[in-house]
Amino acid sequence: MDQKLNLAGKRKSNSKPSTPRTKGLIKSSDEPPPRRTNSKNSSRPHHRPFNSYGGAGPGFSDRFEKAVKENFVKSSLKSSKDAFPAKVAGRSSPRKSPPPHSAPKHRRTTSLAERPETHGGNRNIDPEMTHKRKFSLERPKEIMVVSSFAHRSQKGFIPGNPQKQNQDNFITCVNFGMSAECYFFSVCDGHGLYGGEVSGYIKQRFPTILSQDPNLLGNPRRALISSVIKVNSELNHQEFDISFSGSTMVSVLIRGKKLWCANTGDSRALLGRQLSDAFLSQQNIPVKQSGKHWMSIALSRDHKPDDQDESVRILHCGGRIEAYQDEQGNPLGPARVWLKHQDIPGLAMSRSIGDGVASSVGVICDPEILEFSLTPDDKFLVIGSDGIFEFLSNEEVVKIVVPYWKTRDVQGACDALAKEANNRWTTEEEVIDDITCVIVFLDIPN
């Protein structure tokens, strides 16, 4: 043992002197060996781990940063955050983020008032002039203008035909189109062998067609026209023959203070207006008693074949317009529509729904539309078939209804009007046409 130690000592003595080894410690007087550095990277910190970006060797971080920038330009990434890492080699601090209160550079403005101020611009913009949508939880106020309504329909009389059928029909709808301020009223006067079936089909189908029309709220005029054309088209596919059968139709659609009258044929609609004292004064009419002056306002016109605009269309389509003639060739009754070389169909109106033969020579179903704004002076509405208006003028109808309007008896007004029309037919003719009317009492707010 001693010999071995001596031998070891001899070896030590023969070797160069060395400092004693300490495990894991370095004396304060000793300096760590200098690291090899590159002149380009001498100012960069050397505490980064090997697996960080740019830690693979000298010069790599510069090449990596250049490649990343070139890749950013080529790929056109949306976010700079995705294009560059949080810490890139050679950068002493991370990229500064914008203050939390600042807006993004390319934020899309939703209103003219929110747009940034430009040179010479004016930031004091009235919000009412912007395109901001304004929403309200409050429902718009609905205006109900109908106080009451009633109807009356009775069949006419033809000698030798006790089984005559009433070919008139009427329609009355409240809360029309699911709106409390919307009403629909109509009268249909059928004619021909299947006239009752035609007017009955219109009564059954037309309210449904109109209420489902997408233009009912935005464009009632278009909705009324397209609905009449559609029901006329459907009649061509029914079991009954409409070659020589059809119907008139006069309709009134009310929504708030607006009224639309659609007329096809010779049925009629009118308004009864009470003239105010102020209006009479402007017209230099002496006022003996307030509330005694009334006037009728026609909402429709009868479509007759001898009307100038109607006759031009019929003649252009190859039709012929003549009245019946007696043995001496004198005209009897109203003008009628015929085929050019045949004495059919002899229709006494220029527009109707159905009437397949007459439609081949210019008789159309398209309704004529009148839009009207109601006023507080408009007190009632009368819709009737030509059984009412054949021997009664509009002014006479108003005079009959006014006393019942004053007592608020709308059903009494219908009965009185139908009775007077029947009496006129009895006096003037041997036959009595079907008589139908709908009367609506109005209460228009100021």
Image (cartoon, rainbow, N blue to C red):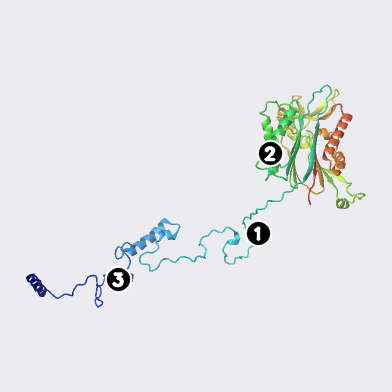
Indicate which disc residue 400 carries.
none
Which marked residue is nearer to the observer: mark 2 or mark 3?
2
Q: Residue at x 85, y 48 (%)?
A: 275
Dot 3 falls on a residue whose secondary structure is loop
Q: Earlier in the sequence, mark 1 or mark 3?
A: 3
Q: Quadrant of residue 80?
A: bottom left
Q: Considering only vertical position in the picture, is 237 above or below 45?
A: above
Expressed as whole percent of the image width and height from the top left, the position of residue 305 reads: 78, 33
Position of the N terminus by quadrant: bottom left
Residue position for label 3: 39
24 or 117, which lies in front? 24
Q: What residue is disc 1 on?
A: 128
Q: Position of residue 10 (x, y in %)?
A: 8, 73
Q: Classify mark 2: helix, strand or loop.
A: helix
Q: Note whether residue 354 is visible.
A: no
> Can residue 71 be seen?
yes
Identify residue type, mark 3.
Ser
Place of residue 87 in the rendered image (x, y in percent of width and height, measured from the top left): 38, 64
Q: CA distance from mark 2 to mark 3?
A: 89 Å
Structural crowding at the residue carrying mark 1, measured as other residues with C-alpha within 10 Å and reported as few (<14), some (14–19) or many (≥20): few
Point out residue 230 in the picture as x, y percentages from the top left corner.
67, 35
State the separation of the CA atoms marked 2 and 1. 36 Å
Residue 34 vertical placement versus 360 (above, below): below
In the displayed structure image, the side of residue 162 where residue 11 appears, left or right? left
Which residue matches tag 2? 210
Q: Residues within 10 Å of mark 3 (few under 14, many from 20)?
A: few
Left or right of 418 on screen, residue 195 = left
Q: State which quadrant residue 70 falls in.
A: bottom left
Q: Earlier in the sequence, mark 2 or mark 1?
A: 1
For image coordinates 70% across by 39% down, the residue present is 225
Q: What SS does tag 1 mark?
A: helix
- Amino acid type assigned to the residue bearing label 1 in the image: Glu
